Image (tube, rainbow, N blue to C red):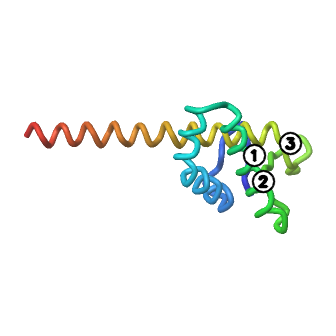
Amino acid sequence: VVVAVGGTLSLSCVGNRRFLFTIAMNMQAFTTAIQEQEQEEQILFDDILALVRTNCANNNGGFLQYNARTKRWYEVGDFMAQKVIANAFWDVQQSMEKTNKKRNKQTERHSTE
């Protein structure tokens, strides 16, 4: 189950960890897609959306959001689901860039000692 709550993901859900693993495994395709065309990016998002919905179909999962007023979960539409997918790619990319910068600083520090 991938939970879209205010555009953020809870890592306490197994489905969200699986989803982020899928995102990480597709980072190279995402990087290539954003350099080429928006259409390629959309195809990648559609593929991941289909993968999540197919894998979750038997478990009543998918892209869900909690409605505090009704105290129920509901499946969000394709637009919101693709927004969650896009945000996940950007978040993973930023995280990777921060890790690389930190690693480069450590390498520079060790090489000057």
Question: Which residue is rendered at x = 80% and y = 61% of the image?
Answer: 54
- How far across and how far down the image is residue 26, in percent? 58, 50
Work out whether mark 1 precedes mark 3 in sequence or the reverse, and give the earlier one: 1
Which quarter of the figure has residue 62? bottom right
Label 1 – label 3 distance at C-alpha: 12 Å
Q: Is residue 96 left or right of residue 14?
A: left
- How far across and how far down the image is residue 59, in percent? 82, 67
In the image, residue 75 sits, relative to residue 31, either above or below, namely below
Q: Which mark is residue 46?
A: 1
Work out whether mark 3 precedes mark 2 in sequence or the reverse, and give the earlier one: 2
Q: Label 3 amino acid?
A: Gly
Label 3 – label 2 distance at C-alpha: 12 Å
- Marks 1/2 in contact by CB < 8 Å: the verdict is yes
Circle 3 sits in a helix, a strand or a loop, which is it? loop
The residue closer to the viewer here, 18 or 46, is 46
Q: Which mark is residue 54?
A: none
Look at mark 3 in the image and give the residue it sits on: 77
Q: Which mark is residue 50?
A: 2
Most extreme residue toward the bottom, as rendered?
58
- How far across and how far down the image is residue 102, in percent? 32, 39
Using a 10 Å C-alpha cutoff, classify the residue at mark 3 as few (fewer than 14 neighbours), some (14 to 19) or many (20 or more). Answer: few
Question: Which residue is rendered at x = 42% and y = 37% of the image?
Answer: 97
Which quarter of the figure has residue 21? bottom right
Q: Label 2 amino acid?
A: Ala
Question: Which residue is rendered at x = 17% and y = 38% of the image?
Answer: 109
Most extreme residue toward the front, as rendered?
36
Circle 1 sits in a helix, a strand or a loop, which is it? helix
